[in-house]
Image (cartoon, rainbow, N blue to C red):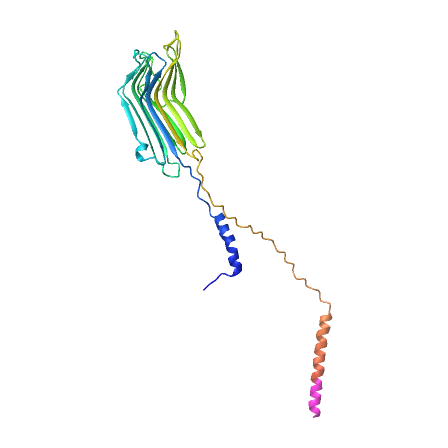
Amino acid sequence: MFRLRRPLRACLPAVILGLAILIPSPAARADVDSVQGAATGVVVTGFAGEIPPTPTVALAADETSPPAALGPFTDTAAGTSLPGFPEVFSTGALSVSAFAGDLSGEDHAGFVEARATALNVNAGGNRATASSIESTCRATGDGSTGTTVIQGGMLDGQPFGNGTPAPNTVIDVPGIGTVTLNEQIRTDVRGSASITVNAVHARYASGPEGIAPTDGSAEAIIGQVVCRAVGPDVNVPTTTTTPPTETVPTTTIVPVTTTPVQTLPRTGSETYLTLGVLALGSALALRLLSGKNAS
């Protein structure tokens, strides 16, 4: 049976630790733990008669909520008007909805959405009208977004606010007050993504130049939606861990200088040495021949 030598066994903990350091860990994920959403068609305050939030829906859910708690939740109303002053404010059909999903995963996918729509809106004695006003919002682990779409908008007989107005567009309307289109109140911070969108927020002027009561203020909100996502890493960008690039050592080639072999000049002694060797060889040969003849 193959066994590791003792020195190798002693090195194993260090090898395992080294591998644990070298292997990249999974990227951090942002988990949406809970969401809240709400939508309201219209609300008017400050007049002798008021319009409470009509219609309205809301939801609150977390990772443990049953599917039924995620919606969609919807509501509708045939229309509404300011009690006693229908010429000041009235609407046609109203609809609202809110729903959520994907809260069970440990990621950014958890979300909540809300939508509010008002048709045939009339404000200020037919001075300001619109065939459709809609607001939407969405909140996820990556943040919150919202938008407003107005169709058939008219002010004093001229097209007004149609399409998707820029967020927080404020317009001064003489005789009515100020109107904010696509009003957005957004708070995206670490751990929470939240946004409130008011498609149209009218703040009525008071006194002789306005239509609000002289002793107070009045306002109307058309198409309000609220979305919020909460979690420990909400609004923290996900990161991907990339293994470090292997660095190949740079090899420096050092040039080698070759010194040529020096040729020494002849001195003449080499010739004398050669002659001496030949002479010695000749003497030995003669002596051998002499001894042979004598025998």
Q: Residue at x 31, y 35 (%)?
A: 67
Q: Residue at x 70, y 81 (%)?
A: 282
Classify residue 236 by image quadrant.
top left
Q: Is residue 166 visible?
A: no
Residue 20 lies, in percent from the top left, at 48, 49
Residue 239 lies, in percent from the top left, at 45, 39
Q: Nearer the viewer, residue 248 or 55?
A: 55
Q: Is residue 257 left or right of residue 98?
A: right
Our reading of the magenta stretch's main secondary structure is helix
Classify the position of the C terminus by image quarter.
Answer: bottom right
Numbered disc total = 0
Q: Is residue 198 visible?
A: yes
| 290 is within the stretch colored magenta | yes
Residue extending furthest top?
208
Would you place residue 192 above or below residue 42 in this image? below
Classify residue 36 by image quadrant.
top left
| 8 is within the stretch colored magenta | no
Classify residue 101 by image quadrant.
top left
For the record, the magenta segment spans 286-295
Would you place residue 91 above or below residue 10 in this image? above
Q: Nearer the viewer, residue 114 or 247?
A: 114
Q: Nearer the viewer, residue 214 or 223?
A: 214
Residue 73 lies, in percent from the top left, at 30, 29
